[in-house]
């Protein structure tokens, strides 16, 4: 349990810093209409974006360790700590001032995680679930289809939709990762790995496109909801994650998510001041 929680928190640290770097770099990317090759070439020659991708990859490895050892509701709440961690790191390294409400939001997130850790049950099944794997592919296809529609839109609604779809994409990565965490190999391993990679890459770009349209805060809030609640629910209902106390788990999730969503605004303030390049 302790190793899984620590892995989630370190992953959150990497994700939080990478998100600010990604947000800064994504606004300088050309639109996809100018060609996928040009978009990819620009991304791979932007040092800040490349660094953020490397941090995300390392964080994903640690996230995989976490979801194989603790219930998904605890692992995902730990990942949601990326925003308070970003706030704390920014306050130290960028001299970014934390308001009283920011401090309360940081405390709320970590209190929620502590409550979840104290009342967490046993991690559920990791064996392959054929219907779940099919569901992951269906969810990924829907994400791509709806993402295409949202990308063609404009304004706050389109940006928020892209953020939510990115969160659902990361939820697919988490649920697929739970299956990959099984201590054996099977013929389904490649099938699961393919959908995890597709969903992860698409989620990364959907989040980037969302932040081209709206603020980091507005894009991050729906992302946090999607990537936290969906795996938590599936983990309990489908995979059998233990829930010793429903009130405690519900309260922990509410506290952790409320604090993280509020602190998405802090991340936005950091970006608006143009200082993430110094992270």
Image (cartoon, grey):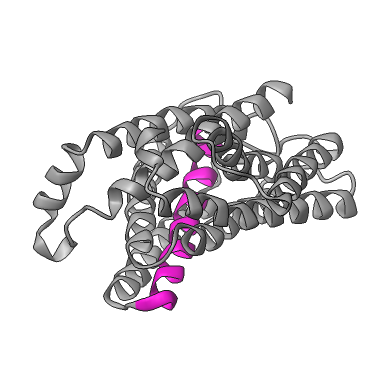
User: What is the x, y in percent for residue 74?
Assistant: 71, 41
Instruction: Tell me: 251 left or right of 72.
Output: right
Q: Is there any visible trace of residue 192 in the rendered image?
A: no
Tell me which segment is drawn in magenta: 155-181
Q: Is residue 168 left or right of residue 209?
A: right
Please tell me whether residue 111 belongs to the stretch shown in magenta: no
Res. 169 image quadrant:
bottom left
Please tell me which residue is depicted at 31% across the width and 78% down the height of the picture. Answer: 153
Q: On the rendered structure, is 203 left or right of 41?
A: right
State the image coordinates of residue 137 (x, y, percent, origin top left).
41, 56
The image shows residue 156, relative to residue 30, as above or below, that is below
Q: x and y percent of residue 120 in the render?
A: 81, 38
Which residue is nearer to you in this view: 76 or 28?
Answer: 28
Q: What is the x, y in percent for residue 97?
A: 60, 44
Residue 174 is inside the magenta segment: yes
The answer to which of 68 and 226 lies nearer the viewer is: 226
Left-right relation of 237 to 199: right
Of helix, strand and loop, which mostly describes the magenta segment? helix
Residue nearer the viewer, 125 or 100: 100
In the rendered image, the quadrant that contains the C terminus is: top left
Whether residue 186 is visible: yes
In the rendered image, the residue lying farthest to the top is 3
Return the residue nearer the eye: 179 or 152.
152
């Amino acid at each position: 349990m302790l190793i899984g929680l620590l892995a989630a928190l370190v992953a959150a640290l990497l994700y939080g810093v990478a998100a600010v770097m990604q947000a800064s770099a994504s606004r300088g990317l050309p639109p996809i209409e100018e060609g996928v090759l040009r978009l990819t070439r620009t991304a791979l020659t932007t040092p800040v974006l490349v660094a953020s991708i490397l941090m995300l990859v390392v964080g994903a490895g640690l996230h995989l360790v976490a979801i194989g050892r603790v219930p998904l509701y605890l692992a995902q709440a730990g990942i949601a700590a990326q925003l308070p961690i970003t706030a704390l790191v920014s306050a130290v390294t960028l001299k970014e001032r934390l308001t009283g409400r920011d401090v309360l939001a940081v405390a709320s997130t970590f209190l929620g995680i502590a409550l979840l850790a104290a009342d967490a049950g046993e991690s559920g099944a990791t064996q392959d679930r054929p219907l779940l794997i099919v569901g992951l592919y269906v969810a990924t296809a829907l994400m791509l289809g709806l993402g295409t529609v949202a990308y063609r839109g404009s304004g706050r609604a389109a940006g928020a939709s892209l953020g939510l779809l990115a969160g659902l994409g990361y939820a697919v990565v988490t649920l697929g990762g739970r299956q990959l965490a099984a201590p054996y190999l099977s013929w389904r391993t490649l099938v699961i790995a393919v959908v995890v990679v597709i969903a992860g890459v698409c989620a990364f770009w959907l989040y980037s496109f969302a932040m081209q349209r709206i603020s980091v805060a507005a894009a991050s809030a729906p992302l946090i909801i999607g990537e936290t609640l969906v795996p938590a629910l599936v983990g309990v209902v489908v995979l059998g994650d233990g829930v010793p106390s429903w009130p405690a788990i519900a309260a922990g999730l509410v506290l952790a998510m409320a604090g993280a969503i509020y602190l998405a605004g802090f991340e936005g303030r950091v970006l608006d001041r143009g200082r993430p390049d110094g992270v």
